[in-house]
Amino acid sequence: MSKEKYSTFFGSNGSKIDQDYERLKANITFAAKKNKAKIFTILSPNAKDGKTSFLIYTALSYCKEQKKVLLIDGDFNKPALHKEFHLSNEKGLSNYLTGEHSLSACIQPTAYPDLSVITAGTISKHLESIIHSRHMNTLINTLRKSYDYVFIDTDALKESTTAKLLAAKSDSSIVVIRKKKANTEDLTEMNAAFKSYDIHLTGAVFNTRRIAWLKR
Amino acid sequence: MSESREIQLRPIFNSLAKKWWIILCFTLIIGGGGSYYFQSDSSSTVASATASVLVGDSEEPQVNMSTMTALMNEAAMLETVAEELPGEAGISELNGKITTEEVEGSQIIRVTAMDETPEEAVVLANTIVEVYPEIAYEITGIDTATVLSEANTSNAVISASTGSNRIAVILMIIGLGAGVGAAFLLDSIDHRIRTEKEIEQLLETPVLGSMSRIDKLSMKSAPKNQKTKLERGKKIV
């Protein structure tokens, strides 16, 4: 069902969402050029703020203009990206970082020609030290050469340090804030974390979409 | 001067506007519910009918108009009236429904009966004036009292009972005040992010854009708009 949504979005032109993402894309592209950034981490204070869908729609909207995009699932607690694209999660980022698999084995193609995905992988413990490993640095350097844009999904910033580490490793980050859910304390806390981890921030995305009552 | 004033008032009105539904709820619940509660005690409208009695001169005994007027509300009088009336009515209840007045400087006594419906008021007023001459004769020995005019439904006056109306207005105002108070309270507790401006201030970063709801409507490609644009262009050319 979700796959269907993405393909209609990919095929649509001039719809309301399309316009939203065109505007977002323009802003991101501009900021990316200015800061020479290619690898973006998507952050949000809480879970279910709409990170994953923002990530996928932005990627698809870049794919529309034949940009090569890679999505990485950095949410090791609740990996979701592979579900959205109906991929397997056996070989993923965590497996690559521990040296189990090579990078080329981890990158999975999708139904969209210019979009590739690295899923979260099977390991979900002691990831802080793994992210600090040299594998992460080589990963980022290789990806920078072969892709136009890389977006990394993370788990809720409040509860995880991996999200902060990934953000610090990447070029820049984008914060997704859900309207009427995040509060002022969340934001001030985030701002402090950005400063202490030296995370570069491109900007924020305001998710005005309401969550369905049942999913709350 | 004007600048400082703006800073003080803007957030106040903003927070009120954000919580408009709380103010509305409080006003409706306290105002509407309260006035409904008070109105269920007393009927919402009151009908009144007026009839009058003329007490003619008589040699023996002397007519004292004050006595004659006071007689209207006496228990002896009201008992007879209660017997005559179709429904069961207590004396004190009847007493509350009747107002008698002596028309100044004349020998006319005016009886105003108030009841829920005009018909009931008319019946009550007429029963009183019909019974009055007999009772007056029995008690005072004056036989000159005659019915001057009877009440009828056409000149019965229906008026909204002013008391409960005022209560409703007062309760509405209380509700409005409580609503405004609650709105301020909730707004000071509520720290959730609502505007892009708040994000920009707190994160010190620009807002790149906003995502709208993903549904059929927003997913729809927009050939319709393009078409109408073209048609317009054609027409102008």
Image: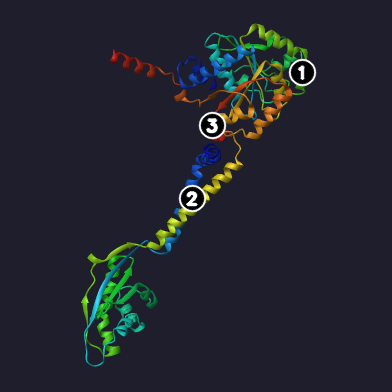
Q: Is residue A107 above or below residue A167?
A: above
Q: Which residue is painted at 63% across and 34% down in the image?
A: A184
Query: Quick one: label 1, few (<14), some, or many (20+) residues within 10 Å?
Result: some
Type of the residue with mark 1 = Ile
Tag of residue B176 = 2
**Horizontal arrangement in the rendering, residue B21 relative to residue B59 (left or right):** right
Q: What residue is at 32 percent from the left and 62 percent from the top?
A: B159
Q: Is B22 situated left or right of A148 in this image?
A: left
Q: Which mark is residue A210?
A: 3
Q: Secondary structure at mark 1?
A: helix
Left of B116 or right of it: where is B218? right
Residue B1 visible within the image? yes
* N-terminal-most mark, 3 or 1: 1
Task: Tell us which disc is closer to us: 1 or 2.
Answer: 2
Closer to the camera, A81 or B160? B160
- Residue found at x 64% / y 27%: B203
Measured in 3D between alpha carbons, the distance from the residue under mark 1 to the one under mark 2, in whole angstroms, is: 60 Å
Q: CA distance from mark 3 to mark 1?
A: 36 Å
How many residues crowd around disc 3 within 10 Å: few (fewer than 14), some, or many (20 or more)?
some
Tag 3 and tag 1 share a subunit: yes
Quadrant in the picture for residue B141: bottom left
Give the residue at mark 1.
A130
